[in-house]
Image (cartoon, rainbow, N blue to C red):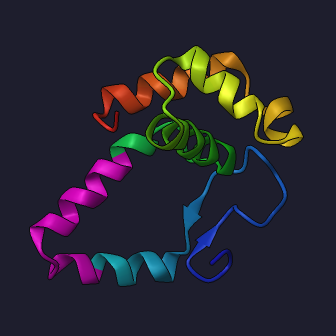
Amino acid sequence: MDGHFIQGVGDGVVEAEIKPDEEALQQAKQFLQHADSAINSHIQRVANLIDGYQSPYGVELLSTVHWVIKNEGAQTPEQAFYLIQQWNERKKQLMTQQHVNAAWVQLAQQNWI
């Protein structure tokens, strides 16, 4: 997808912001003008969730925390952090308790958990 519909994922920079390709953005806007309102509602829900988390790491963090809540039974941010630390060395080094806490709050505030 990187380079075709979005930019910022394949550049190897963890903090790079994910942005849509301008042509793809115009095509998407045109499609959404004629789309069912439910589609726009879902898109807005995701947009609200990732607000402030538009980097590849931010999206990975949100999705990882969501996964351990929904699929591994984490009941607290501390449990989520512990479970994430068991996944692999990369996540263990990258995802801090503070980051997991922030993602947990974002997921809760946006009614994803």
Residue 59: image x %, image y %? Answer: 58, 47
Q: From this view, report whether residue 31 is shown above or below residue 110.
A: below
Q: From this view, report whether residue 40 is shown above or below residue 104.
A: below
Residue visible at 25% across and 58% down in the picture: 42
Quarter of image, res 50: top left
Residue visible at 31% across and 34% down in the picture: 110
Query: What's drawn in magenta, residue-wise?
Result: 30-47
Residue visible at 61% across and 41% down in the picture: 58
Left or right for 58, reference 47: right
Residue 31: image x %, image y %? Answer: 26, 83
Taking the view exactly as shown, the residue that stands out farthest to the left is 37
Quarter of image, res 25: bottom left
Q: Depth check: 47 or 110 in front? A: 110
Q: From this view, report whether residue 81 is shown above or below residue 72.
A: above
Magenta: main secondary structure: helix
Residue visible at 54% across and 38% down in the picture: 72
Quarter of image, res 100: top right
Residue 46: image x %, image y %? Answer: 36, 51
User: Disc count in the image?
Assistant: 0
Residue 38 shown in magenta? yes
Residue 36 shown in magenta? yes
Q: Depth check: 97 or 54 in front? A: 97
